[in-house]
Image: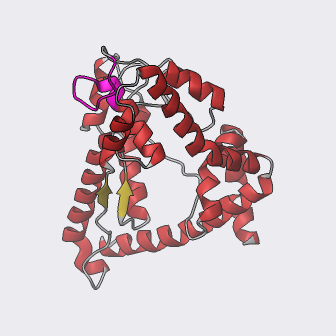
């Protein structure tokens, strides 16, 4: 482990300068409760691809698209295949990326698989995992757009938001005409808040709608904020814990890097042998 830490010491220091400790800590939260997982920082080189639906709306509203927007699907495919992933939980807008990743794996396995693996499979074929109710969470300020970290701050809920900020954002979120809390197509804003409520409370949307029958939007939005605050409170506490213990964070990251390197080296060697490169 000591040699491994020395090997990645420079990379860690660069990452530390690039991201503040709070952002880095958020990436390690789940590792505290699930030691079998590997949490590690990832880097990328730029490649260009221009065939994905997810980028069209941004492309239409700007003179050109940032290279990160173009390279992201390629990086995503590489990450999924390199670590022999079985299932990828994503939002609706990322589904196509995983499907194309699966197509890349199938093509490679078909062309080179027999040379690299007794089973004829070099890469696992990843499957998409979508949660219907939360497959696409929309902006708090515009229910026609998805919630995104690239939007204005009041349009989204950040895991680091304080309780009063969450309450303010939800209470100021746009609503639809009318007074009834309903999950219907012509009420996209309220339907979006219902999905968020359901995701944070684990209650079926139908039960939530019944609970607020005859009540106004203000009562409903206040409760939405409360369930969000309750849900992410534990995450925020763990973030604070990690912020105050950089050594714990380093331990998690270095152990994650070590696990990831073992898997990735095995996959890379298998792929090179299959393609006749070694």
For the stretch drawn in magenta, what is the main secondary structure?
Answer: loop
Q: Which colour scheme appears in the figure? A: secondary structure
Instruction: Name the one closer to the observer, 119 or 185.
Output: 185
Magenta residues (range): 179-191
| Residue in view at x 38 percent, y 39 percent | 208
Q: Position of residue 21 (x, y in %)?
A: 71, 42
Q: Quadrant of residue 176?
A: top left
Please tell me whether residue 180 belongs to the stretch shown in magenta: yes
Instruction: Name the one closer to the observer, 4 or 156.
Output: 156
- Taking the image as shown, residue 53 lies to the left or right of residue 146, namely left
- Asked if residue 142 is positioned above or below residue 245 in the image, the reply reads above
Q: Residue furthest top?
A: 177
| Residue in view at x 72 percent, y 55 percent | 249
Q: Is residue 145 visible?
A: no
Instruction: Name the one closer to the observer, 182 or 78.
Output: 182
Q: Residue furthest bottom?
A: 118
Q: Position of residue 165 (x, y in %)?
A: 62, 25
For the image shown, how many numbered marks are present on the structure? 0
Please tell me whether residue 183 belongs to the stretch shown in magenta: yes
- Asked if residue 56 is positioned above or below residue 132 in the image, the reply reads above
Q: Position of residue 162 (x, y in %)?
A: 66, 31
- Taking the image as shown, residue 268 lies to the left or right of residue 183, namely right
| Residue in view at x 42 percent, y 63 percent | 82
Instruction: Quadrant for the C terminus, please.
Output: bottom left
């Amino acid at each position: 482990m000591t040699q491994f830490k020395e090997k990645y010491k420079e990379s860690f220091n660069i990452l530390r300068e690039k991201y503040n400790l709070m952002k880095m800590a958020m990436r390690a939260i789940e590792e505290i409760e699930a030691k079998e997982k590997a949490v590690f920082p990832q880097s990328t080189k730029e490649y260009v691809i221009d065939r994905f639906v997810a980028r069209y709306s941004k492309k239409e509203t700007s003179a050109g698209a940032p290279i990160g927007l173009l390279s992201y699907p390629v990086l995503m495919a590489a990450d999924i295949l390199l670590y022999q992933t079985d299932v990828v939980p994503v939002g609706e807008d990322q589904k196509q990326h995983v499907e194309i990743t699966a197509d890349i794996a199938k093509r490679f396995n078909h062309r080179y698989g027999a040379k690299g693996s007794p089973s004829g499979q070099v890469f696992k074929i990843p499957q998409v995992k979508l949660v219907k109710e939360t497959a696409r969470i929309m902006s708090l300020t515009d229910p026609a757009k998805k919630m995104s970290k690239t939007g204005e701050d009041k349009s989204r809920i950040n895991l680091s938001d304080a309780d009063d900020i969450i309450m303010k954002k939800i209470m100021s979120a746009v609503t639809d005409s009318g007074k009834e809390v309903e999950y219907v197509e012509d009420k996209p804003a309220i339907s979006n808040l219902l999905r968020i409520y359901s995701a944070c409370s684990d209650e079926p949307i139908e039960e939530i709608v019944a609970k607020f029958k005859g009540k106004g939007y203000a009562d409903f939005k206040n409760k939405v904020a409360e369930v969000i605050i309750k849900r992410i409170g534990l995450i925020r506490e763990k973030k604070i814990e990690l912020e105050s213990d950089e050594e714990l964070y380093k331990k998690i990251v270095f152990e994650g890097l070590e696990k990831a390197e073992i898997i990735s080296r095995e996959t890379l060697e298998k792929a090179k042998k299959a393609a006749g490169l070694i």
